[in-house]
Structures are given as C-alpha cells and as structure tokens.
Image (cartoon, helix red, strand yellow):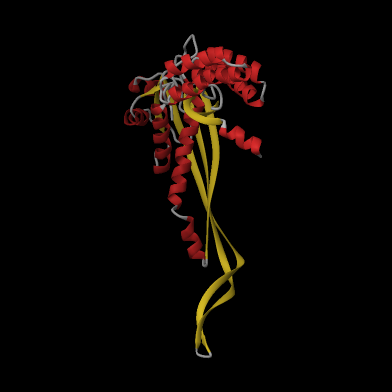
Amino acid sequence: MNLILFMLACNKTINFQITVPAQIVVEQDIKHIAPINREDDSISKTTMENFMKELQDAQNPRFSMVPKSKAQRTYTMARSTEGQLLNREQTQKICKNAEVNGIVSLETIRHDKDWDFSTYESTKEKKRTIEEDGETREQTIREQITMHRAEFSVDMQVNWKLYSCNGRVLDTYSKDISKKRRGQGESRSDAKIAVGETDDLINELAKQQGLLYMRRISPYEISATRTMHTCGPKKMKEGNKAMENGRFDEAERLFIESAEETNKKDKGKSLYNLAILQERTGRLDEALKNALEGHRYLQNDMSQRYVDILRKRKDEAKQLADQLGTTQPQEQEAAPE
C-alpha cells in the first residue's frame, strides 16, 4: 500500500490534444464537398449540422465544404428520386452547381423510441408524533410500498454515402446506436417524470451520428493523457515546471541537462519526460528515440507502455500523411487542454 501511494505521489498526468487519422482513406482529388441531407427533417438536420460543425472545428480537416444552404439548393435542383441512389447525371449537376468535387449525403435516418415500465416492492419509513400518558414522542413507522420504474429507450439508424462527381459511391456507412434513460418514483407518472426530457436523448443520438461519420472520413482531435515523473533530480523538476507553464524550450534544455548529470534511474526519468515534451510539440521521431533510451534505464511497465504508444502514433502519423496528401507526417505543436 505504501509503495502504491509513493508511486502515485511521484507521478502526475497531463492532457493535450493530438490528431488521429480517419477510419478510411478517401481519394485525394476529393477535397471540397457538398453536404446534402436527403431526409431534411429536424432530426436529420441536427445530425448534418453536427457533422459540419465537427469538420469545421477539426485542426486538420480532410475536406472543405460549401455552405449547407447552397449544397441543399443544388441537391433540390438535381431532382433525385426518394429511396434511390443519386445517379451520374445528378451528381454531376450537384458538383457543377455547388462547385465541389465530392458529395457527402445523409441518405436516411430513422429512430424508434419505447417506454418500459415495471414495479418492485420497497420499504418506506415515516415519522409521526404520538401522545401517550401525557408525553409526546416521535415514532418511526415502516410500511411496504410499490415503487415504479420507467425506462425510455431510443434506437437510431443512419445511412451515409460519399459520392464522386461521376456518380460512384466511394463509401457507404450504416450505423445503429441506442441509449436508455431510467427513473423511478412512487407512481408511474412520477417515474416517467424522473426520466427527464426525452427529446434531449434523441438530439444526443442525432449529434453523435454526425460526429461518428465525420470521424470516419476526416482526421480529428482527441485528448491524450500522459503520466510524467515528478520525483527525481532538481533540474527535471524545474523542467516539469517550465513545461507546465508553456516554456517548452527551457523545459527541453533542463531535461537534457538533467539526463546528462544524474544516475541511471534519474537519467531514465529525465529522458522519459523529455520524450513527452517532444511528443507534445509534434516531434515524434525524437520522442520515440528518447523514450527508448529512457526505457533502457528504467525497464518498467510505465516506460514500455509509453514506447508502445509512440510507435502507434508514428504509424498513425503515416496514415495522416496519406489522408491529408502530405509527403511527411504533420508535425505541429499539440494544443493543451
């Protein structure tokens, strides 16, 4: 127990944003897209709006987009048939009028909602005041009551397609997601009220569907958590402080000096922290080199895990380069949280 507490006291976590690759690679000549909504009801609008918002907010978006109103107007002018794929003539017309080279289409979205009710027996305590032999006192009464449970569930199915301008379907994506919300009370209506606003749950799913497809076709950012060493030589601690305050050049110098001046274990810790700094500032090659060197001295699970993380990030950097059409992986300073 004391060892665990010591290890926790000698480590701290930091968080920063990193870019990860999309799930699929889209042809490089498709860079500017028209997002069209073939359902055009309130739920599909929520899904499409969140898809567009997430793509616009990405640090390294794979695509640029025309405004939603322009995309939808060109889709209407193409006169498609409900329930049928867009044909070559229609996609060419949309691309020409919207001045794009690809089309992201929300083809269909459906949702089913359901209530389920049940009961169970419970005991409820009540207090009452009684008067006996001229004295007043409180009495606790336990009574058996029937409690009611309510469960609201939503299941939402969506279908997306990515079209080229010559009518080819480059990607088809169907996703079914569901959520539940529960409540309970002394009556069926109380339990239903305790569930809360059901429209919020439907909107949450609609937004999630937009987010999921954006992450399928474009790189996006996630929060990375890294564990740093805090117990060690003075210069390493000073490096931690400089890094915490955004003074990265100073922190790097201190970590390097600490690694040169200390014993093997402290050298490993300093190199490990240096690697995290280099990862955060987008230098994955240097980070992996120093993480490997640090692991040579530390030889523990924590240092091995970090080496594995960096190897995975190196692979992802190559995928990002392919997806973004760059010759070298993107190396930019990661945003702090």
Query: Quick one: 201 or 241, which is closer to the camera?
Result: 241
Q: Left of 265 or right of it: where is 243?
A: left
Q: Quadrant of residue 122?
A: bottom right
Examine the rendered structure and indicate whether residue 314 appears above or below residue 36. Answer: above
Q: Looking at the picture, how far across and down is residue 189, in whole percent?
A: 48, 64
Which is more toward the observer, 336 or 18?
Answer: 336
Query: Is 32 situated left or right of 152 in this image?
Result: left
Q: Residue furthest top?
A: 327
User: In the rendered image, is residue 278 in sight?
Assistant: yes
From the viewer's side, name the closer residue of 185 and 229.
Answer: 229
Q: Tell me if residue 243 comes above or below residue 144 in the rendering.
A: above
Can residue 80 be seen here? no
Determine whether 188 is above or below 108 in the image.
below
On the image, the x and y values in percent for residue 171 come to 52, 25
Q: Residue furthest bottom?
A: 133
Q: Nearer the viewer, residue 177 or 68?
A: 177
Q: Is residue 253 left or right of residue 294?
A: left
- Residue at (49, 60) in percent of width and height: 192
User: If the image is split into quadrants, where does the N terminus sit?
Assistant: top right
Please provide percent x and percent y for residue 297: 64, 17
Q: Quadrant of residue 34?
A: top left
Placement of the C terminus among the 4 image quadrants: top left
Q: Residue at x 53, y 74 (%)?
A: 126
Residue at image point 46% right, 34% down: 210
